[in-house]
Image (cartoon, rainbow, N blue to C red):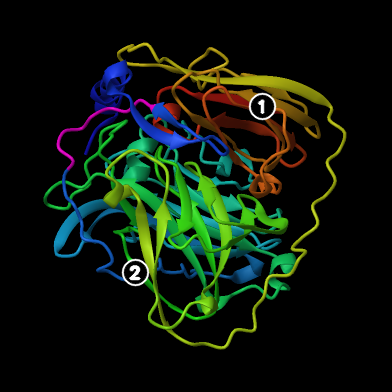
């Protein structure tokens, strides 16, 4: 495994080499752009294993069972440890896991019912567990420097005082989060409430979490890790490459998570058929949004409903990715839906899903700039407001109870970023001076910024006090310093 020193040395130096003009390759398309944008990444040797698609069924991560429910509190025991899994059938690979699962097990929680997770670190590197998108006390936030030493444990308390949302948990140990998440330390945390449960949406076996990411596999099926690697061209869904999903001819709800380090995805059905987006990072949208594609940058989530009743039995339908760098036969397909049977379907998507609270009057405004070196600096640096991350520095003082408008800008000409805030879900007010896309009108905790883009958002800080970070959720960028601290007091 790459050590902290290697990450800061060889890994960052490799990214620096990738920031020369010769190394740039078309990578990602903006939300409404017509041309590709070049993204610098480091080369990591030969492209590695090419996997034949649609040979393995989509695995669904196990739902974690509590070890105690006394007193109305669900207590879970989780161990971070190495495990051997067959990412490619017949080729065992070493991965990092929560409880031996790759990706980690799903935790199902309810608003108003606290969850306690007892984490034990049996790895040889420090870890820190962050519940992404959650409003939690700062001691349970999984701050980058608030780590669990090898052999030690930590108890995280999640009060679940926020509404429903498809959250996820992952490692956040500074300088190591990129490799740890890449090697497997992430999982879903599905928080529900009465608002969500009362809706006639697909549920039970027809409600499936799918974590999508990229990987570089060597010839023996092992994960290759180099920061900024352009050869992460094998796409994984729930930990396996290009699976098939046997579905009935009825509606399904899919909870899509982009758990990749840096890659974004634009997902569409091969026939261009409708996808109904019903939710984003912070839960359900006010109403459904019918589209032909869903865009997710690293860390973003989207809940969608796909109706397979319009297809005859025997149909095989590929979920495609239409953005990114790499061979089209590898990065252009994610998984395949196989319509194999009929099934009764009482579910439907109502025209109104939830009512969001009106935004309060803003009490303050501030501007945030995300930027990294583009001139071939070795190693490159990444900045928020011209500063690299310093855990001993407070960058933004926020009054408890304030509702602030943050104007976040990416001035880079080549490199995209996205923006994630701990503690709060925010509302996107504008993207480049215009109304946000329909998929961005709900509650968000992560938002994409292409080169030159500006996003205005509003966040209300009326829950917990303490120090929390905000950063680019392209984990290689945050590991290089694109992270800052806000203190709510």
Q: Are marks 2 and 1 in contact (CB under 8 Å)?
A: no
Q: Measured from the top left, where is residue 171 in percent x and y? A: 42, 43
Question: Viewed as shown, does residue 193 lie left or right of 58?
Answer: right
Residue beneath disc 1: 487
Side (left or right) of 14 relative to 447? left
**Label number found at residue 244:** 2
How would you rate the neighbour count of disc 1 (Cα within 10 Å): few for under 14, some for 14-19, many for 20 or more?
some
For the question of whether residue 98 can be seen, the reply is no
Q: Residue at x 46, y 69 (%)?
A: 63
On the rendered image, what quadrant is the N terminus found in? top left
x and y, in percent, of residue 200 in the image: 69, 76
Q: Is residue 42 magenta?
A: yes
Residue sitting at x 51%, y 63%:
107
Q: Secondary structure at mark 2?
A: strand
Marked residue nearer the N-terminal end (2 or 1) = 2
Nearest-to-viewer mark from 2 and 1: 2
Picture quadrant of residue 333: bottom left
Name above or below for residue 362 compared with residue 440.
above
Per the image, label 1 sits on a secondary structure element best described as strand
16 vs 314: above or below: above
Prevalent SS, magenta region: loop
The crowd level at tag 2 (other Cα within 10 Å; few <14, some 14-19, many 20+) is many
Is residue 190 visible in this depiction of the protein? yes
**Location of residue 19 (image quadrant):** top left
Task: Tell me which segment is drawn in magenta.
Answer: 39-47
């Amino acid at each position: 495994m790459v050590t902290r020193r290697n990450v800061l040395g060889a890994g960052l130096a490799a990214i620096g080499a990738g920031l020369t003009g010769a190394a740039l390759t078309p990578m990602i398309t903006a939300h409404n752009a017509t041309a590709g944008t070049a993204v610098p990444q480091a080369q990591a040797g030969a492209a590695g294993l090419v996997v034949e698609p649609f040979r393995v069924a989509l695995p669904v991560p196990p739902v974690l069972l509590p070890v105690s429910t006394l007193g109305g509190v669900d207590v879970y025991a989780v161990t971070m440890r190495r495990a051997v899994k067959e990412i490619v059938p017949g080729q065992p690979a070493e991965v990092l896991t929560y409880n031996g699962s790759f990706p980690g097990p799903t935790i199902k929680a309810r608003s108003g019912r606290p969850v306690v997770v007892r984490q034990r670190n049996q790895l040889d590197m420090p870890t820190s567990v962050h519940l992404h998108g959650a409003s939690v006390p700062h001691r349970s936030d999984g701050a980058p420097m608030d780590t669990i030493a090898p052999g030690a444990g930590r108890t995280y308390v999640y009060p679940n005082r926020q509404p429903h949302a498809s959250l996820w948990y992952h490692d956040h140990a500074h300088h190591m989060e990129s490799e740890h998440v890449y090697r497997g330390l992430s999982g879903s945390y599905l928080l529900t409430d009465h608002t969500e449960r009362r809706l006639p949406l697909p549920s039970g076996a027809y409600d499936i979490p799918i974590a999508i990411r990229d990987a570089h596999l060597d010839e023996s099926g092992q994960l290759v890790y180099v920061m900024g690697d352009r050869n992460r061209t094998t796409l994984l869904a729930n930990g396996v490459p290009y699976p098939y999903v046997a579905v009935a001819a009825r509606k399904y709800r899919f909870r899509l998570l982009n758990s990749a380090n840096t890659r974004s995805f634009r997902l569409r059905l091969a026939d261009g058929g409708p996808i109904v987006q019903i939710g984003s990072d912070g839960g359900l949208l006010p109403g459904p949004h019918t589209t032909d594609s869903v865009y997710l940058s690293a860390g973003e989530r989207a809940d969608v409903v796909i109706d397979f009743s319009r297809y005859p039995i025997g149909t095989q339908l590929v979920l495609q990715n239409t953005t990114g760098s790499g061979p089209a036969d590898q990065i252009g397909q994610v998984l395949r839906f196989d319509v194999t049977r009929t099934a009764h379907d009482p579910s439907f998507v109502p025209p109104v899903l939830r009512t969001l609270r009106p935004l309060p009057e803003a009490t303050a405004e501030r501007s945030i700039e995300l930027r990294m070196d583009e001139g071939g600096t070795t190693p490159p640096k990444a900045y928020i407001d011209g500063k690299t991350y310093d855990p001993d520095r407070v960058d933004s003082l926020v009054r408890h109870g304030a509702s602030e408008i943050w104007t976040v800008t990416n001035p880079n000409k080549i490199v995209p970023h996205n923006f994630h805030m701990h503690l709060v879900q925010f509302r996107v007010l504008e993207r480049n001076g215009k109304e946000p896309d329909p998929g961005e009108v709900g509650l968000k905790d992560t938002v994409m910024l292409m080169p030159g883009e500006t996003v205005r958002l509003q966040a209300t800080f009326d829950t917990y006090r303490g120090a929390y970070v905000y950063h680019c959720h392209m984990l290689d960028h945050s590991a290089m310093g694109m992270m800052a601290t806000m203190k709510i007091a």
